[in-house]
């Protein structure tokens, strides 16, 4: 087992990793920026080192400072959490060169999965269904026009090295493709230092479904079922649940078997998530792999009983999946997660500031993952996530009822949060019936008002 694990992250995920390490008896090191000096992950780690000012580029994204912190504290492993350096192949490579275990996939696999078109090709070769699209990176707008004509409009241009909606453009006709190609290429170059684009068939009203993967370093791969992540805004998830209310068990098994083969073929290790779009006819198509633990991993933990973060650490220490997981993986009941963000619930404007009062809900079937506390400050420099509220029930109806109760009892004062938005969604008849696609959230957004005297 590791002597000491350095947690190269902040907020609730840093605290989550520290909890897993404590249960395994592993000492931890927290790194923090000056803005996070009073954060809970700093308080509850065994050691803590300040690595720079608030700006991420000078602290949480600085390889040299994080590796130096590991060496100074004699940490022999680093858990990157999600975001920041979690999918940075260069960082994983530096860890390897310094004799520090990176708790995640190998640098080679992270690099492969990060290049979306290469990941598509790997999945296609393994028999995983992939959306019709370009065969590799597009060389020009002219080539994009040829591919789009062959598969039919609408299509979507995507950054090969990207994610989170950046470097993406939906194209509905050939006349607009050249200008949108140039826009997407420019945005991709600015965001990811790589202008490469590929093209896929665009599904107008999709659902977003992802499968949780765990793979050891001895060739074993297991799939822990799927999560429904369709409720999202601008490609950022708001609510997740497991299992999906619309995926038949036979399709779950078919995709899971294909993914076991695919991930074994690419040499995948540790935790990861394979994301799919579901079309209007219920067909699944691969879109990308997230080579890290996901924000929404708790819903899978609650329905399977598997501690994903602890399993990540044990896999990295050389354990075999057969020692760590039940067989077969159980799916018990239903779980839902609401991301509570420091944002205005109608305009989505960021709302950093001091939390003046806080009450966390509890009782049976309720879990709260957070690093917030009364009088703590939510800084303006990072992601707006304040807490993850997760409920579990014997079925989806009970999980929803518990979530509605828990949201009523969740009090955060001093800042705006998305709690009122979640309350409206959880009471919506279509959500309750499981009838939704990725356009669902638009009905809950505040209408755009025009300035007085403006033309109509």
Image: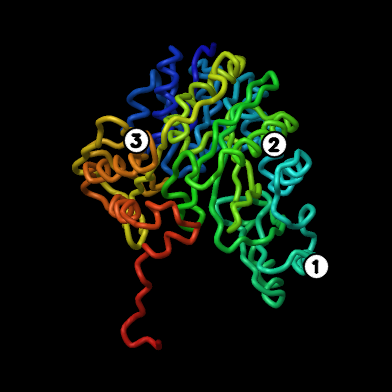
Instruction: Judge left or right: residue 439 versus residue 265.
Output: left
Classify 10 Å Cα crowding around label 2: few (below 14), some (14-19), many (20 and above).
some
| Residue 217 sits above or below residue 265 on the image | above
Q: Quadrant of residue 171?
A: bottom right
Classify 10 Å Cα crowding around label 3: few (below 14), some (14-19), many (20 and above).
many
| Image quarter in which the N terminus is found | top right
Which residue position holds label 3?
370
- Real-space CA distance between mark 1 and mark 2, rounded to the nearest whole angstrom: 31 Å
Position in image of residue 229 (x %, y %): 49, 47
Q: Which mark is residue 146?
A: 1
Which residue position holds label 2?
258
Mark 3 vs mark 2: in front:
2
Position in image of residue 139 (x %, y %): 80, 60
Labels 3 & 2 near each other (Cβ < 8 A): no
Label 1's element? helix
Labels 1 & 2 near each other (Cβ < 8 A): no
Which residue appears at 50% of the width and 26% of the height? 330
Label 2's element? helix
Instruction: Judge left or right: residue 327 versus residue 356.
Output: right
Which residue appears at 44% of the width and 52% of the height? 434
Q: Colour scheme used in the picture?
A: rainbow
254 or 126, which is in the foreground? 254
């Amino acid at each position: 087992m590791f002597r000491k694990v350095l947690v190269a992250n902040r907020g609730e995920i840093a605290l989550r990793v520290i909890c897993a390490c404590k249960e395994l008896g592993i000492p931890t090191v927290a790194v923090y920026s000056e803005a996070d000096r009073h954060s809970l992950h700093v308080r509850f780690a065994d050691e803590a080192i300040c690595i720079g000012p608030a700006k991420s580029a000078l602290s949480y994204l600085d390889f040299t400072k994080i590796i130096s912190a590991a060496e100074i504290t004699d940490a022999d492993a680093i858990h990157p959490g999600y975001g920041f350096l979690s999918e940075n192949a260069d960082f994983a490579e530096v860890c390897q060169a310094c004799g520090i275990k990176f708790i995640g996939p190998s640098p080679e696999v992270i690099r492969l999965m990060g290049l979306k078109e290469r990941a598509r090709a790997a999945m296609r070769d393994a028999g995983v269904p992939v959306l019709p699209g370009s065969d590799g990176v597009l060389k020009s707008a002219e080539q994009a026009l040829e591919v789009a004509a062959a598969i039919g409009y609408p299509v979507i241009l995507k950054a090969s090295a990207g994610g989170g909606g950046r470097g993406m453009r939906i194209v509905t006709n050939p006349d607009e493709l050249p200008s949108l190609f140039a826009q997407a290429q420019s945005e991709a170059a600015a965001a990811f230092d790589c202008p490469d684009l590929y093209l896929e068939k665009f599904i107008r009203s999709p659902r977003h479904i992802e499968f949780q993967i765990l793979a050891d370093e001895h060739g074993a791969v297991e799939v822990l079922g799927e999560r429904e992540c369709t409720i999202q805004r601008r490609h950022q998830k708001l609510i997740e649940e497991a299992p999906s209310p619309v995926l038949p068990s036979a399709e779950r098994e078919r995709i899971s078997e294909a993914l076991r083969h695919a991930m074994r073929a690419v040499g995948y290790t540790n935790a990861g998530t394979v994301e799919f779009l579901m079309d209007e006819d219920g067909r699944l198509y691969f879109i990308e792999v997230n080579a890290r633990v996901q924000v929404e991993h708790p819903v899978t933990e609650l329905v399977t009983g598997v501690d994903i973060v602890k399993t990540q650490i044990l896999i990295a220490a050389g354990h075999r999946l057969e020692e760590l997981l039940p067989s077969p993986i159980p799916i018990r009941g239903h779980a839902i997660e609401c991301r509570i963000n420091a944002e205005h619930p109608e305009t989505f404007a960021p709302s950093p500031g001091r939390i003046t009062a806080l009450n966390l809900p509890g009782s049976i079937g309720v879990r709260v993952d957070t690093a917030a506390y009364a009088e703590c400050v939510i800084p303006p420099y990072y992601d707006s996530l304040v807490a993850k509220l997760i409920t579990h029930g014997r079925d989806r109806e009970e999980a929803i009822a518990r979530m509605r109760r828990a949201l009523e009892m969740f009090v955060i004062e001093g800042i705006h949060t998305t709690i009122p938005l979640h309350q409206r969604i959880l009471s919506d008849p279509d959500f309750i019936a499981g009838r939704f696609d990725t356009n669902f959230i638009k009905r809950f957004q505040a209408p755009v008002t025009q300035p007085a005297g403006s033309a109509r």
